[in-house]
C-alpha cells in the first residue's frame, strides 16, 4: 500500500478541524422522512463537497434499492464502500483510497466511464499508447493528471494496484474518483459498524469530511439508526434523512443482488456485465463465445411489467422474452427471499417472460452447463414462437 506523506497527514488533520466543517445542528434537530422511491434521487442529487447522513436502512438494503434505480443522464453513479474501524482519520482515508484503487483495477481496461485502454500492452508501443490516451483523457476531463494516469495504468498492466508512489493523497483520491466515474461520484460509506465499534468515532467523521473535500464529490454516511445530534456526529447531520420504513413493500434486505456485500459496489449499472461481479463477467465471456447466443443477450436491463414495476434483471433476451437471474445464497437462501423472488418471477411471467434462475455456485463451478441451460431455453422459446 502506498503511504501518505507527512504533508498529507498534516493536511487531513487540519482540514478536519471542527470549526471548518459542516454547520452544527441544534438540539431540536429532527431528520426529514425519505420515502423509499426517493432514495436514489436523494443520493445522486447530493451536492458536491458535502457529507449527508442517511438513516433507517442498512448497507445491503441500500445497495439493492440502488441496483434497481435507473441510470442518470448525467452519468453520476454511487460507489458503496464498507468502512472498517480504524484508530485515526488518516487510516480510514487510506482504507478508502485502497478500496477505490482496487475498484479501478477491476474496472480496467475501461476507465473514466468510457475511455478504453484495451489495446494497450506492457511494452514500448503500449506505453506510448497509454501516454496518448492519458493526455486525451486529461484534456476532456477537468482535474485529471496525465502523469498520474500513465503511472497508474502501467501499474495495472504489471498486475499491481494503481496507487502511484509519491502522489499527494488528495491528487490520488481525486484521480481515482474520476477513474470510476468521469461525471461525478457519490461515495456511500457504510459507517454504522465502524462508529459503534470505534474507540474514537470522530476519526470516521473527519475522514468523511476530507473525502468530500478531496474528491470534489459527495459523501453519504449510512446509519441503520441516525446518531443523536451530539459531537462528533452533529457535524454531518445537517440535511440528513430517515428512510420511511412504512413505504417498504418487501423486507429490503432480501432484494436482488448476487455479490458479496462486504465489497465495494457501483450502482446504478446497465447494459453490460457489472464490472465488480466476477460471476457476471465470466458468464458474459461464456455466452459471448457461443455462436448461437452471443448476439441475443444483454446484461443488467430493466423490464417494465404489467404491474407497473421495473425490476432490473441480470441477463435478458428481449426478443425471446427470456430472463436469466443469478442468485447468491446469502440473499436468496431464506424464506423471505424465496417469497420475494417468486413474486418477482410472477410479475415477469405475467408480463410474458420466461425466467431461468441459476445460482452463483452453479455458474462458477460449470459455466458450460450454465450456457447449455440458457441455450436449451432459447431453442424452446423459438420453437414455441414458430408453433404459435
Image (spheres, helix red, strand yellow):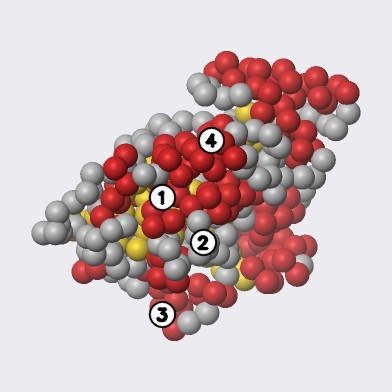
Which residue is found at the position 53% from the left and 50% from the top? 90
Label 4 neighbour load within 10 Å: few <14, some 14-19, many 20+: some
Q: Disc 1 designates what residue?
A: 206
Q: Estimate the x, y position of residue 385 in percent, counting from the top left.
A: 55, 55
What separation in Å lies between label 1 and label 4 (alpha carbons)? 14 Å
Give the camera-side residue of 134 and 95: 95
Residue position for label 3: 336
**Residue nearest the viewer, comparing 281 with 143:** 143
- Marks 1 and 3: in contact by CB < 8 Å? no
For label 2, the SS is loop
Mark earlier in primary sequence (3, 2) = 2
- At x 82%, y 40%, the residue is 158
Check disc 4 and report its element: helix, strand or loop. helix
Give the number of the disc on residue 170.
Answer: 4
Give the image quarter of residue 218. Answer: top left
Mark 4 and mark 2 residues within 8 Å of each other at the beta carbon: no
Q: How far apart are marks 3 and 4 (CA)?
A: 44 Å
- Alpha carbon separation for disc pair 3 and 1: 38 Å
Query: Could you give the CA–CA distance between mark 1 and mark 2, rounded to whole angstroms?
Result: 12 Å
Tell me the SS state at disc 1. Answer: helix
Q: Is residue 174 left or right of residue 75?
A: right
Task: Decide which of tag 1 and tag 2 comes sooner along the chain.
Answer: 2
Q: Where is residue 214 in the image (x, y as percent from the top left)?
A: 47, 36
User: To which residue does mark 2 refer?
Assistant: 87
Q: Is residue 379 visible?
A: no
- How many residues crowd around disc 3 within 10 Å: few (fewer than 14), some, or many (20 or more)? some
Amino acid at each position: 500500500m502506498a503511504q501518505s506523506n507527512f504533508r498529507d497527514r498534516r493536511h487531513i488533520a487540519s482540514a478536519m478541524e471542527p470549526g471548518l466543517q459542516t454547520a452544527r445542528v441544534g438540539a431540536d434537530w429532527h431528520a426529514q422522512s425519505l420515502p423509499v422511491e426517493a432514495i436514489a434521487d436523494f443520493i445522486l442529487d447530493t451536492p458536491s463537497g458535502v457529507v449527508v447522513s442517511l438513516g433507517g436502512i442498512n448497507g445491503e438494503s441500500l445497495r439493492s434499492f440502488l441496483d434497481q434505480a435507473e441510470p442518470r443522464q448525467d452519468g453520476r453513479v454511487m460507489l458503496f464502500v464498507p468502512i472498517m474501524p480504524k484508530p485515526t482519520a488518516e487510516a480510514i482515508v487510506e482504507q478508502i483510497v485502497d478500496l477505490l484503487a482496487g475498484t479501478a483495477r477491476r474496472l480496467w481496461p475501461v476507465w473514466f466511464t468510457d475511455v478504453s485502454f484495451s489495446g494497450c500492452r506492457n511494452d514500448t508501443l503500449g506505453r506510448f499508447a497509454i501516454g496518448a490516451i492519458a493526455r486525451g483523457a486529461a484534456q476532456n476531463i477537468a482535474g485529471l493528471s496525465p502523469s498520474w494516469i500513465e503511472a497508474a495504468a502501467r501499474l495495472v498492466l504489471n498486475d499491481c494496484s494503481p496507487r502511484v508512489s509519491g502522489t499527494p493523497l488528495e491528487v490520488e483520491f481525486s484521480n481515482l474518483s474520476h477513474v470510476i466515474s468521469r461525471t461525478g461520484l457519490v461515495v456511500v460509506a457504510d459507517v454504522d459498524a465502524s462508529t459503534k465499534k470505534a474507540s474514537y468515532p470522530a476519526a470516521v467523521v473527519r475522514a468523511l469530511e476530507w473525502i468530500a473535500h478531496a474528491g470534489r464529490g459527495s459523501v453519504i454516511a449510512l446509519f441503520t439508526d441516525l446518531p443523536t445530534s451530539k459531537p462528533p456526529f452533529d457535524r454531518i447531520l445537517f440535511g440528513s434523512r430517515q428512510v420511511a420504513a412504512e413505504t417498504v413493500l418487501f423486507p429490503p434486505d432480501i432484494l436482488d443482488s448476487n455479490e458479496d456485500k462486504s465489497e465495494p459496489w457501483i450502482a446504478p449499472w446497465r447494459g453490460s456485465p457489472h464490472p465488480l461481479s466476477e460471476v457476471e463477467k465470466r458468464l458474459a465471456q461464456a455466452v459471448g463465445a457461443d455462436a448461437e447466443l452471443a448476439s441475443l443477450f444483454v446484461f443488467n436491463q430493466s423490464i417494465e411489467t404489467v404491474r407497473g414495476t421495473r425490476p432490473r434483471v441480470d441477463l435478458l433476451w428481449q426478443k425471446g422474452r427470456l430472463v436469466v437471474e443469478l442468485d447468491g445464497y446469502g440473499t436468496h437462501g431464506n424464506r423471505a427471499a424465496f417469497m420475494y423472488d417468486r413474486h418477482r418471477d410472477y410479475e415477469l411471467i405475467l408480463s410474458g417472460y420466461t425466467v431461468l434462475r441459476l445460482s452463483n455456485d452453479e455458474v462458477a463451478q460449470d459455466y458450460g452447463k450454465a450456457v447449455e441451460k440458457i441455450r436449451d431455453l432459447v431453442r424452446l422459446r423459438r420453437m414455441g414462437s414458430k408453433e404459435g
